Amino acid sequence: MATIATDQKTGPARLGDRIFSGTALAAGIAILLALAGVFIFLAIEGVPGLAKPAEFYGEASNFWGYVAPLLFGTVLAAVIALIVAVPLAWGIALVVSHYAPKSIATPIAYVIDLLAAVPSVVFGLWGISVLARQLQPGYVWLDENMGWLPFFAGPASGTGRTILTAGLVLAIMILPIITAISREVFSQTPRLHEEAALALGATRWEMIRMAVFPYARSGMISAVMLGLGRALGETMAVAMVLSAGGGISLNLISSSNPASIASNIASNYKEGTPGKIQVLIATGLVLFLVTFLVNFAARWIVTRNERKLAR
Amino acid sequence: MSVATAPTRPTSEPIAFTQAKLPRSAPVLVAVVAAAAAALPVLLLDWGLVVWALVAGLVYLVALPVWARVVEGRRGAVDRMVTGLVWAACLVAIVPLVSLLYTVIDRGLPAINSTFLTYSMYRTELDQEVGIYHALIGTLLITLGAAVISVPIGIMAAIYLIEYGKGSRLARWITFLVDVMTGIPSIVAGLFAFSLFILVFGPSTRLGIGGSVALSLLMIPVVVRSTEEMLRLVPADLREASYALGVPKWRTIVKVVLPTALGGIVTGVTLAIARVVGETAPLLLIAGLTTRTNFNVFSERMTTLPVLIYTQNANPGIAETPGGTPPGIEIAWGGALVLILIVMMLNLVARVIGAIFAPKTGH
């Protein structure tokens, strides 16, 4: 120790510092490079896939005709997932942050985190063999009784492996992340705002509407967008559950819905020739750009809000 | 904050200082009545337990607000309905988890035995016993590879963000992009590794290490974020005491800051491993599929557990007895149980480590 203390300004210590800080900086830059690398390598392999002869795109005549139904399928499944998951997630987050006593809130939060730990392939397996079979009679009923709605036009799928089932599995998968972030922002509401509302005679729900929601609004929005990002990119659950076929259609209960981009890659890469693989990578590039934008926007809202609150 | 103006009472009414309220036991009372009321038609029409729970829940969600509407007025009714709805959300979310865990245990347990865990799928005779040993080894090695790549990069990057680059423009951008990176779809990470390796090694390359590269892309942001949180919790006093003794900054970080934050960092790394160990899509693309046990990540294909589950489910083969379960499905469920056990164990380990080495911030 003595030598280091006396030699503070000379060789070894300064050199050690420089090497260490250099390594740390290099690691930071490596992350930026990795992100740039994802874009660059996908572009190198994927851009040739944008302009192949028509036979590479199946029934479509060009790349955009090929990717449009897939993009539609991706968005449709994600939207179904959001419609189901968001109200549930906000409800659970409210229970954990405001309704339940701590002795119940902690186990609930733990159980929801447990849901996040289940691998997607297991969700897929469960989706096919349990959920799809349970829902199938329900689809038949919907087709018979509510067939006038375009969503339930039918004919009902015999296996239950429809875009609605896939969307429901996705909803379960994105529930934990939306819950976790909403819970975080709900519990950050200043105690004084809440008590002021209650002191004015507000019921608990009125207090939440007047004190908690305005405070947490941007956090809630970004939680939804992060959930959307997850749902757009999720591969295995959709690839396993959805039996895809056909083009753009709002019919949720038949087996004539397009696959999502991610699941299309997973189920078609194997029989791909190099040219076909380039087309798949090009669709992956589209997916990357879409999810990147969604995540970018979500995080930007969070960061902007953090700065606003810090001031 | 703009507060909605309170509804003005008609002046003719006498002002009451307390509102009429339902008795404290009202929710329990209504729940019991709802359960009984729902039981009647369900028993008569011979419906199942699920329908009974649904009907009882609906009766409760309607009856309690109606009663509150009569006694407490509109505001009380809305409040009670919302309370019922948010609790219902909790119950609804737990149903799939219970169903999933039950199914995995119920169908996975019969498949698991010592042969299942110690044999590969490679057979030299037609009716040889098979197992998932090769997939366990593949998962272990590829995840280990991902950890070897991402843990040093992740920890050093977090050190840069907290100790060196604090407040700089570069550090702000890295923090932001790390957050964005947590949302990269796993299939995109797989496509990245795939493009990289086919560009370097030719079009039909399938390597275990490629899977490690793809997984590390998913793992690095998690490691950075958790390490960052932990380093932030290290009290500044400790650093300053060390500087006052003349210790250079890098030795302060290595000898004082990192050991203080070690427990939290290990927890974060374990959770990151738990996240990537169940990843399927990237490994499907780049690590490929084989029936043999491969110990070398730098050559040839490697099967991992999630990929095995996916492919066995997709091509289950033919059942020995007509109407029985095809062998692939059995293997898939057995594998799913093993995979869930691995992930849960990692989570448990992370929690135990986190509890033991909880950051000592108190003075």
Image (cartoon, rainbow, N blue to C red):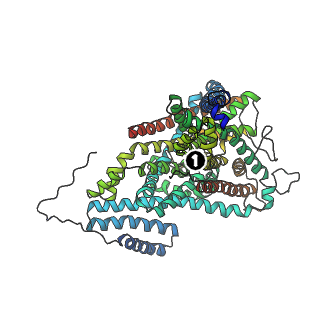
How busy is the neighbourhood of tag 1: few (under 14 within 10 Å), some, or many (20 plus)? many
Q: Is residue B249 visible?
A: yes
**x and y percent of residue B307 in the render?**
70, 47
Left or right of residue B256, residue B111 in this image: right
**x and y percent of residue A171 in the render?**
52, 50
- Considering depth in this image, is B217 or B333 the residue closer to the camera? B217
The total number of labels drawn is 1
Identify the image quadrant of residue B337: bottom right
**Label 1 secondary element:** loop
Identify the image quadrant of residue B108: bottom right
Amino acid type indicated by mark 1: Ser
Query: To which chain does the residue with label 1 belong?
Result: A
Left or right of residue A288, residue A269 in this image: right
- Considering depth in this image, is B161 or A227 the residue closer to the camera? B161
Left or right of residue A160, residue A190 in this image: left
Residue for badge 1: A255
**x and y percent of residue B101 in the render?**
61, 60
Left or right of residue B91, residue B116 in this image: right
User: Residue visible at 18% across and 66% down?
Assistant: B16
Up the image or down, A130 lies above or below B67; here it is above
**x and y percent of residue B328 in the render?**
74, 54
User: Residue visible at 47% across and 41% down?
Assistant: A225
- Considering depth in this image, is A198 or B6 the residue closer to the camera? A198
